[in-house]
Amino acid sequence: MLNIPQEKLTAIKNFAHQYIFKLLCQQDIPFILAHLDPQLIGIGAAEHNYYDTPQAAKDFILSLEGQIPACELLNEEWTILPLAQGLYLAQGRHYLTSDEDQQLLVQTHQRATIVIRDLGSDFSYVYINLSHPYQELQGTENFPFQVGSQTYKYMEAELNKAKEQLQQKQQQMEVVLHSVNGGVKSSNDDDTYSYAYISEELPGMFGYTMEEFKKFTGNNAMGMVYPPDLPRALADCNECFKDGNPT
């Protein structure tokens, strides 16, 4: 096996790193195109990403311009194996996470196999294969970014739905408060029925401020009940909510 001087080894690792970093973190497609070997071929993670001619591989890389949002590259590892004089295999793995401003939820491991040609004063990419763990694969060449975008949009929609439901409940509560003389409270479904909501009117009915009322009752509905009545009240609650009944 050919020995690789440390300086050369460092340069090859850095060149392998540049492909991942320039593509996924900086979207510097011109740098990558300028360093493609005339004999370049590449294979992507999915079946339809098989490119067996230099032009097909180049066209694929060109198609990625503007399609991959910026990511952070973490926990990078590279192993370099000399194949022949001036030809090296770079095997690596790393972790990708999307930038916070990209509206993506992407956190994935990725593996890389890159064949690098030593041109003397520079290097070129002869073969490139980026892959993901099998359980994470999807049938799109831009995975994991398309999946990350879909996940973000799904969670954003769910969050908006939850906000809308909360707003409706608040509006319903306001209607109730304007329709009755007195106060309103709601409790969480926990051991003490801790307060989820207390209207401003409720403490005033008993001559307390909001802070005094919470302190006096222990910030839970059990603290509002006359102590001798508490066992019956709890039994009534258990009866009301048994078998998953939500009301």
Image (tube, helix red, strand yellow):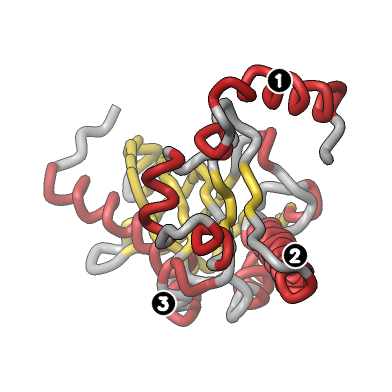
Q: Residues within 10 Å of mark 2 (few under 14, many from 20)?
A: few
Residue 129 coordinates in the image, percent (x, y): 57, 49
Residue 232: numbered disc: 1
Between 1 and 6, the one nearer to me in the picture: 6
Q: Residues within 10 Å of mark 1 (few under 14, many from 20)?
A: few
Q: Which residue is disc 3 drawn over?
A: 31
Q: Which residue is disc 2 drawn over?
A: 169
Foreground tag (1 vs 3):
1
Mark 3 vs 2, N-terminal side: 3
- As drawn, 234 above or below 141: above
Quadrant location, the N terminus: top left
Foreground tag (2 vs 1):
1
**For the image shown, how many numbered marks are present on the structure?**
3
Between 166 and 18, the one nearer to me in the picture: 166
Query: Tag 3: residue type?
Result: Phe
Q: Residues within 10 Å of mark 3 (few under 14, many from 20)?
A: few
* Image point (33%, 41%), residue name: 78
Of helix, strand and loop, which one carries label 2?
A: helix
* Image point (26%, 33%), residue name: 2
Q: Is residue 84 left or right of residue 163?
A: left
Residue 101 coordinates in the image, percent (x, y): 47, 74
Between 74 and 89, the one nearer to me in the picture: 74
Query: Tag 2: residue type?
Result: Lys
Query: Tag 1: residue type?
Result: Arg
Of helix, strand and loop, which one carries label 1?
A: helix
- As drawn, 154 above or below 236: below
Of helix, strand and loop, which one carries label 3?
A: helix
The picture quadrant where one finds residue 77 is top left
* Image point (21%, 46%), residue name: 9
Residue 56 coordinates in the image, percent (x, y): 71, 67
The reply to whether residue 17 is in sight is yes
